């Protein structure tokens, strides 16, 4: 089955210190809350086992299930999905102090394995990639909205 990929990269100013922002973005419960369509999310140490609601696009149905591990180190948060999943995500967020808060430099790539005919994949890749990138941006927006004041 073919894989499809989308990436979103963005830098934003945040009205909180780098320490507060990093703590929020590394909080597994906050991550779970900001993730759209969660059917179940089992947290163990620094890993979340996500099962998301099935998405039905008519000719393609997709039910994501994956385990993602989050690591905070210094002023940076990184994450990666364990092998064997039908959805893979990886990325990093760096938090830098500024006057009045901090700046987040955020990049995330999401890959999904969809049950479509191999000959359909080239036609779908230009459509699916931007949809995945938009989903990442929506997640980032929800995480920022959830920042503590």
Image (tube, rainbow, N blue to C red):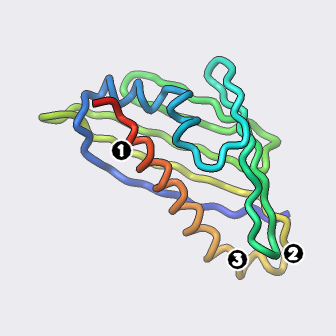
Q: Is residue 141 above or below residue 114?
A: above
In the image as oriented, which residue stretches furthest toward the left?
99
Is 44 positioned to the left or the right of 91 in the image?
right
Q: How many marks?
A: 3
Image quarter of the C terminus: top left
- Per the image, label 1 sits on a secondary structure element best described as strand
**Of callouts 2 and 3, which one flags the residue occurring earlier in the amino acid sequence?**
2
Q: Do the numbered discs 1 and 2 sit on residues whose CB atoms are within 8 Å? A: no
* Cα gap from disc 1 to disc 2, whole angstroms: 37 Å
**Of callouts 1 and 2, which one flags the residue occurring earlier in the amino acid sequence?**
1
Q: Quadrant of residue 66?
A: top right
Q: Is residue 47 above or below residue 122?
A: above
The percent coordinates of residue 20 (x first, y second) are 32, 25
Residue carrying label 2: 117
Residue carrying label 3: 124
Residue carrying label 1: 105
**Of callouts 3 and 1, which one flags the residue occurring earlier in the amino acid sequence?**
1
- Per the image, label 3 sits on a secondary structure element best described as helix
- Per the image, label 2 sits on a secondary structure element best described as loop
The percent coordinates of residue 33 (x first, y second) are 54, 37
Residue at 43%, 41% (x, y): give it: 143
């Amino acid at each position: 089955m073919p894989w499809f990929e989308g990436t979103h990269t963005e830098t934003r100013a945040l009205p909180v210190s780098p320490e507060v922002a990093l703590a929020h973005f590394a909080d597994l419960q906050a991550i779970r809350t900001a993730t759209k369509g969660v059917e179940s999310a089992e947290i163990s140490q620094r890993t979340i086992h996500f099962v998301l609601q099935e998405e039905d696009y008519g000719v393609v149905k997709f039910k994501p299930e994956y385990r993602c591990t989050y690591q905070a180190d210094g002023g940076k948060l990184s994450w990666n999905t364990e092998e064997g999943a039908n959805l893979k995500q990886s990325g990093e967020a760096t938090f830098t102090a500024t006057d009045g808060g901090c700046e987040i430099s955020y990049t995330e790539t999401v890959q999904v394995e969809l049950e479509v005919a191999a000959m359909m994949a080239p036609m779908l890749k230009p459509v699916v990639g931007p949809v995945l990138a938009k989903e990442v941006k929506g997640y980032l927006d929800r995480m920022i909205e959830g920042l503590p004041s």
